[in-house]
Amino acid sequence: QSALTQPASVSGSPGQSITISCTGTSSDVGGYNYVSWYQQYPGKAPKLIIYDVTSRPSGVSNRFSGSKSGNTASLTISGLQAEDEADYYCSSYTGSSTLVFGGGTKLTVL
Amino acid sequence: QVQLQESGPGLVKPSETLSLTCTVSGFSISIGHYWGWIRQSPGKGLEWIGNIYNSGSTYYNPSLKSRVTISVDTSKNQFSLKLSSVTAADTAVYYCARDKGGSGWTFDYWGQGTLVTVSS
């Protein structure tokens, strides 16, 4: 299975909105509504911020939202804050009952 | 509060077997949920290794399946990872995590991670 495709980096200014894409195939992203997003700070474990494409775990800011169209899922962060600067990873369940991650995107808040 | 803690050798020689244990507290593995292992090579992205249920049912990453064994010990509230014939490419931070349940694989609780270096 191949890793999902994410942009290596994105950036935005405080208060702006940014979107990170996650492209897969009909066997993973396009075939199931089981896309998750994780936020990871340097040296820390990933934190779940979006699951099942659009759902947010309790305690996660509503500035984070997810969507999907075809084989591409997206994470949108609105009202960008300095604390959002981190690495973001998508993942998707696959038709082989396995899991595949994206390569990760480094978000820089300018 | 669910907590997970990885433990095991931080240095493994090439061709040997990497062995790690994840100890779970604040939640009984016997109740349910799948439990997984994920790794992250230095400066790289996340890679799913595999998941296990309390019954012992397992799912593995096809690229690692021939070398991976995940097992569970409900009496100790632990699950373990064995990765055989390791090379330098297996050097990574290894995380254990809990699948949140429902459908798909989604990890809601993670251990802090443990760095395993493969070197002679």
Image: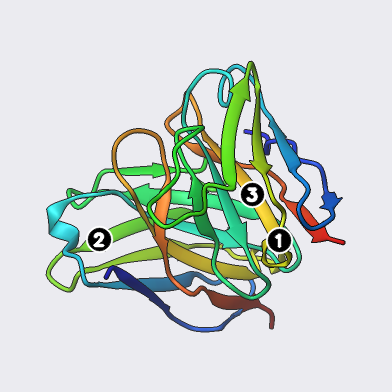
Q: Is residue A109 left or right of residue B5?
A: right
Residue B92, percent across and down?
Answer: 63, 68
Residue drawn at 42 percent across, 57 percent down: A59
Between label 3 and label 1, give the one nearer the viewer. 1
Task: Name the subunit of mark 2.
Answer: B
The amino acid sitting under disc 3 is Tyr
Residue drawn at 38 percent across, 49 percent down: B51
Residue B35, percent across and down?
Answer: 33, 54
The amino acid sitting under disc 2 is Val
Q: Quadrant of the C terminus of chain A?
A: bottom right
Give the Cα distance between marks 3 and 1.
18 Å
Which image quadrant for residue B93?
A: bottom right
Tell me, yes or no, if residue B66 can be seen here: no
Question: In the picture shown, does residue A14 fall above or below A21?
Answer: below
The amino acid sitting under disc 1 is Gln
Q: Which mark is residue A81?
A: 1
Mark 3 sits on what residue? A89
Q: Which mark is residue B72?
A: 2
Q: Which mark is residue B63?
A: none
Q: Is residue A85 left or right of residue B7?
A: right
